[in-house]
Each structure stands twice: as structure tokens, then as C-alpha cells.
Image (cartoon, rainbow, N blue to C red):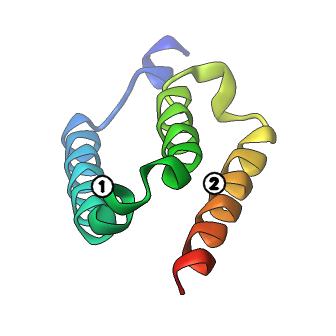
């Protein structure tokens, strides 16, 4: 049982991390002007996204349904931010 639980495909995990970092870099590049021009408005969205990203590494949080609410809150604040500048 223990060998099954730790049988990870490490190259795929590394590839996924690299792709996620690249996606973050692209997202920050696209949103940089908005973030800088309205840092106070963007701060709640940035804080929630950062804290949620950190919490994804805690094994006890991965399977919980409250992950839905973190994503929903982040999406809602992002929508409010976009509506303000649209």
C-alpha cells in the first residue's frame, strides 16, 4: 500500500510545475498595468490568490469542498476588478 501511495511520476510533476509557473508569468504580464495602477483595489484579489496557492500544498485541504469557495471568491473579486475598469 505504501509503494502505491508514493508512486509519483516526478517528471510529469516537474513539467506541471513549470507550466504553472509559466502561466502565472503570462497572467502577471497581462495584468501588470492594472495591478500597478490600482494596487489597493487589487490587493484583496492578490492576497486570496496567493494564500489559496499556498494552501494547495496542504494535504488536508486538497479534498475539502471549501476549495470551491476559495475559487469562487477569487473569481468574484476578479470580476469586480474587471468591471471597475471596463
Q: 4 left or right of 84?
A: left
Residue 48 at x, y = what percent? 58, 40
Image quarter (top left, top right, bottom left or bottom right) of the C terminus: bottom right
Q: Which mark is residue 24?
A: 1
Q: Is the residue under label 2 in contact with that under label 1 (CB below 8 Å)?
A: no
| Relative depth, front residue between 82 and 39 | 39
The residue shown at (48%, 26%) is: 57
Q: Give percent across and percent down for residue 44.
A: 59, 44
Dot 2, how many residues are within 10 Å of its Cα: few (below 14), some (14-19), or many (20+)? some
Task: Find numbered disc 1 in the image and state the secondary structure of the residue it sits on.
Answer: helix
**Left or right position of 25 against 58:** left
Q: Which residue is mark 2?
A: 74
Which of these two is toward me, 63 or 41?
A: 41
Q: Secondary structure at mark 2?
A: helix
- Residue 8: x, y in percent? 35, 32
* Residue at point 25%, 47% (across, down): 12
Residue at 48% in and 24% down = 4
- Asked where in the image residue 30 lies, by quadrant, the reply is bottom left
Amino acid at each position: 500500500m505504501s509503494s502505491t501511495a508514493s508512486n509519483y511520476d516526478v517528471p510529469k510533476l516537474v513539467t506541471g510545475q513549470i507550466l504553472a509557473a509559466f502561466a502565472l508569468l503570462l497572467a502577471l504580464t497581462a495584468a501588470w498595468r492594472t495591478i500597478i495602477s490600482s494596487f489597493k483595489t487589487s490587493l484583496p484579489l492578490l492576497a486570496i490568490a496567493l494564500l489559496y496557492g499556498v494552501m494547495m500544498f496542504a494535504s488536508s485541504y486538497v479534498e475539502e469542498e471549501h476549495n470551491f469557495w476559495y475559487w469562487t471568491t477569487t473569481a468574484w473579486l476578479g470580476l469586480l476588478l474587471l468591471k471597475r475598469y471596463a
